[in-house]
Image (cartoon, helix red, strand yellow):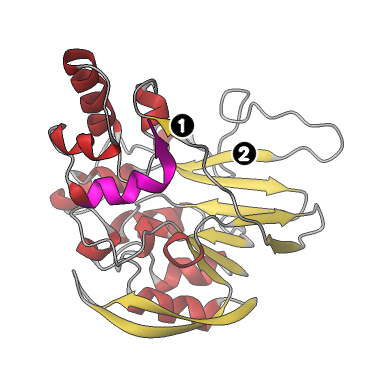
């Protein structure tokens, strides 16, 4: 999907929006995609795949949600220019860009969205591993400050850890409706067609995964196990036979004690 294919109101079709409900029918639109030519960014920004992220808006009656992916500052300026003078970017719920990274949200973008609620997909900073929220300092304190000043909905006050740089965190108090997977685990929101949103208080318990019979896709549902590690588990099992204990996962290349401790509550033999 390229930006040239996307009009001033976004783009939708039966592929982008396959949902067809009776009554109020959700509308799924793409607002941004790959830019085939450099729109005036620096060469570094243009060669950064983050700036070619899909931006998606979902509307359900007057309820709306905006996802900006990993879009960074120069692309956000182009996005704002594209929809200047419209309300296309206005949304009730904002899925915060780039896991709450300091370059994932600008004040100008937030002013245009005017969200009530913010959702952040970022892990628990206590997981001190590579490619984690801890390694990158997500979510960033400056972004949280911007959200706290802009959001209109509130939540029960909680005390969390906010990133102040890579692998550096400070104590932080959240009182506005910012929900993050690292603090809240699974987050479920419900909305009606009149624009009323609320958080569903529910706990989702993962199904146990049998590491001796699970497929690659089933293994990928485990915390800390992506496609590469899931394939490594299956390959090791095929070559060496079934695992006798969960701790035998330590023999799989790329898996160590920290990962085993992450998956232990969710696996069985």
Q: Is residue 158 above or below residue 81?
A: below
The residue carrying mark 2 is 28
Of the numbered discs 2 and 1, the one sitting upstream in the chain is: 1
Task: Decide: is 76 above or below 46.
Answer: below
Residue 63 x/y as whole percent? 72, 55
Percent x, y of residue 30? 52, 39
Q: Which residues are magenta?
A: 258-269
Q: CA distance from mark 2 to mark 1?
A: 16 Å
Instruction: Specify whether residue 188 is painted magenta.
Output: no
Residue at 38% over, 20% down: 213
The quadrant of the rendering that contains the N terminus is: top left
On screen, residue 15 versus residue 131, left or right, reads right
Viewer-nearest residue: 90 or 85: 90
Q: Quadrant of the C terminus?
A: top left
Residue at 24%, 27% (x, y): give it.
Answer: 233
Which residue is farthest right? 23
34 or 241: nearer the eye? 241
Name the secondary structure under disc 2. strand
Mark 1 neighbour density, 10 Å: few (under 14) some (14–19) many (20 or more) = some
């Amino acid at each position: 999907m390229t930006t040239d294919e996307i009009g001033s109101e976004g783009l939708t079709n039966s592929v982008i929006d396959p949902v067809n409900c009776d009554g109020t029918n959700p509308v799924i639109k793409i607002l941004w995609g790959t830019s085939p030519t450099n729109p005036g960014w620096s060469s570094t920004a243009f060669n950064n795949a983050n700036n070619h992220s899909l931006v998606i808006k979902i509307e359900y009656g007057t309820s709306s949600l905006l996802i900006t992916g990993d879009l960074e500052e120069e692309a956000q300026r182009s996005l704002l220019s594209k929809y200047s003078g419209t309300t296309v970017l206005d949304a009730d719920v904002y899925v915060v860009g780039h896991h709450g990274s300091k370059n994932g949200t600008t004040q100008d973008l937030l002013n245009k969205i005017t969200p009530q609620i913010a959702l952040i997909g970022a892990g628990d900073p206590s997981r001190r591993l590579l490619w984690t929220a801890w390694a990158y300092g997500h979510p960033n304190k400056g972004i949280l400050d911007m959200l706290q000043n802009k959001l209109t909905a509130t939540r029960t006050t909680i005390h969390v850890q906010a990133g102040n740089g890579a692998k550096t965190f400070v104590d932080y108090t959240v009182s506005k409706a910012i929900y993050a997977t690292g603090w809240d685990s699974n987050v479920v929101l419900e909305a009606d067609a009149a624009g009323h949103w609320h958080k569903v208080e529910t706990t989702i318990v993962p199904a146990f995964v049998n590491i001796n019979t699970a497929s690659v896709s089933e293994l990928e549902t485990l915390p800390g196990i992506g496609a590469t590690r899931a394939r490594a588990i299956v390959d090791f099992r095929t070559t060496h036979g079934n695992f006798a204990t969960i701790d035998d996962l330590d023999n799989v290349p790329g898996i160590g004690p920290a990962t085993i401790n992450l998956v232990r509550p969710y696996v069985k033999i």
